[in-house]
Image: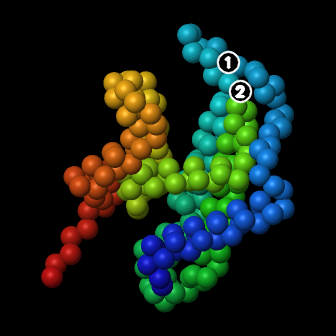
């Protein structure tokens, strides 16, 4: 029954605790992630060379998204999750075990985060204690795509990722010394623009409240 903002702050707090435990248990040295394929292997498509690790991450992400869509749209758990997200009291009145739905939702979120962490730790990157901060990049994608739309978050993630790469290639050099690392904040600038122009996002529902 708490606002979403409370859940976000609590999640960040738990993340700090887990990060402290990881540092105490395994130290701060970066570690590599072994793969079942050639880590240095690449696939050539025209003039582009794509690493097998990147292809594996794309394939795993696509399968996870398809599985999540089927779960949300075609399963009883998915219907219960959508009903709970829409109105907890109404879901309880219909006999939906809201507590179990929340537990299942957290479990699914943790599993998807673990899958993402595995591929983020593969070559050319490594697993380190600061790797979790990359999750902060999800905020612009969720807000730009629309809080109510999983599809919007995916589309916005791709668009923001492409815009960040283009900003690094074209905007950073044009800004000179000021342009160092500018591409990293570019998605957040786009988020601010969307919040000012279209606060409900690309695929979000525009809510009209009569007073």
Count of numbered labels shown in the rendering? 2
- Residue 145 in view of the camera: no
Task: Name the residue located 48 percent from the left edge and 77 percent from the top edge.
Answer: 6
**Label pair 2/1, CB-CB below 8 angstroms:** yes
Left or right relative to 87: residue 201: left
In the displayed structure, 43 sits above or below 58; it is above
Q: Which sits in the foreground, 10 or 16?
A: 16
Classify residue 3 as left or right of residue 127. left
For disc 1, the marked residue is: 43
Quadrant of the image for the C terminus?
bottom left
Residue in the picture at 61% in, 82% down:
99
* Residue at image mark 2: 52
Q: Position of residue 204 (x, y in %)?
A: 34, 58
Q: Which mark is residue 86?
A: none
Of 157 and 28, the residue lying toward us: 28
Tag 2: Cα neighbours inside 10 Å, few (<14), some, or many (≥20)?
A: some
């Amino acid at each position: 029954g708490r606002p979403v903002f409370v859940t976000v702050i609590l999640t960040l707090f738990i993340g700090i605790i887990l990060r402290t435990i990881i540092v105490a248990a395994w130290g701060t040295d970066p570690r590599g992630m072994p793969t079942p394929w050639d880590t240095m292997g690449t696939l050539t498509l025209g003039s582009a060379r794509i690493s097998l690790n990147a292809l594996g991450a794309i394939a795993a992400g696509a399968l996870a998204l398809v599985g999540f869509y089927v779960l949300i749209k075609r399963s009883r758990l998915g219907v219960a999750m959508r009903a709970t997200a829409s109105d907890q009291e109404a879901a309880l009145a219909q006999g939906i075990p809201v507590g179990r739905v929340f537990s299942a939702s957290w479990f699914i979120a943790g599993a998807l985060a673990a899958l993402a962490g595995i591929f983020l730790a593969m070559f050319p990157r490594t697993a380190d204690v600061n790797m979790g901060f990359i999750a902060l990049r999800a905020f612009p994608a969720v807000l730009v795509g629309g809080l109510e739309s999983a599809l919007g978050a995916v589309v916005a993630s791709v668009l923001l990722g492409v815009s960040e790469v283009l900003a690094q290639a074209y905007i950073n050099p044009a800004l000179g010394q000021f342009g160092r690392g500018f591409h990293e904040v570019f998605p957040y600038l786009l988020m601010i623009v969307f919040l000012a122009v279209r606060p409900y996002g690309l695929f979000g529902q525009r809510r009209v409240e009569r007073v």
